[in-house]
Amino acid sequence: MRTSIRLGVLAIAAGALVGCGGAQIGSKEEAAKLTGVAGNKGSAGGGVMKLFQSAADANGAFTASCTHGGTVSAALVLSGGQNAGLGALELTYDGCVEPVYDDPSTEAVEREDVVFDGKLTVTMSFNVGGGSAGFTIAMKGRVDLGGAYSDYLEMDVEQTFGVVGSETGVAFSFTIDGTVSTSSESYTYDQESYSFMAEGSIRRNEPGA
């Protein structure tokens, strides 16, 4: 009898632990930051292009290790979808662990690991001219989030990245257009601008700044 009671208590305790997950996405800015991490840092901190520095596997997919564990791979989409002929890629996040940083205006720059799992269809185009260079990534699909978050990103967005180095240490920025849905909200973006900071955080650029 005592044994069965103990097992019951352990089962309840285990269930309570399983139920304790990470936080839900709480704002439009937070969703944009996580979308930026998925699009740029989802391949060992170097963005989608980083994948192609690795060797293709037997299936023709390129795979890279993520910053703190797991992988992300890219395979050419050969059929299906209106953008297939434009070199669409399917990104697969498999336990891809990437650090996400807090608001850089706080006294300490805190970092929490987020686990990405899921698939995104991606198309890319390059933008050169006017003394600047950049590229646009269109991303559509869903990634589930673990670690610091217990939520998901269902996205249909375009992110345009550009180099904007300055004395503040900003390496580059991106604008986001489209929609991102989470478990609780759906957000629409219209040319909203963010910058990746030197220490790894992402900050929203104020309009007109």
Image (cartoon, rainbow, N blue to C red):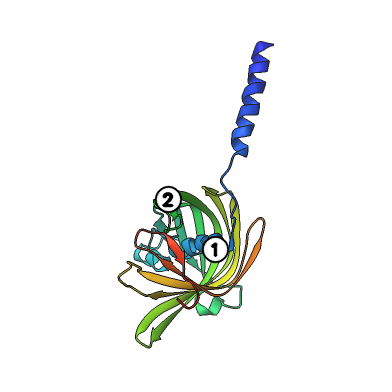
- Residue under label 2: 111
Residues at discs 2 and 1 in contact (Cβ within 8 Å): no
In the rendered view, would you say 109 is above or below 49? Answer: above
Q: Which mark is residue 121?
A: none
Inter-mark Cα distance, 2 to 1: 17 Å
* Residue that protrudes farthest toward the top in the picture: 1
Reply above or below: 88 against 102: below
Of helix, strand and loop, which one carries label 1?
helix
Q: Is residue 150 above or below residue 55?
A: above
Residue at image coords 65%, 27%: 12
Circle 1 residues within 10 Å: few <14, some 14–19, many ≥20: some
Name the residue rendered at 32%, 72% in the picture: 166
In the image: residue 183, left or right of residue 62: right
In percent of width and height, residue 7 lies at: 64, 20
Label 1 belongs to which residue?
Answer: 29
Q: Is residue 99 left or right of residue 169?
A: right
Which amino acid, by three-letter code, is at mark 1?
Glu
Which amino acid lies under the numbered mark 2 shown in the image of this protein? Arg
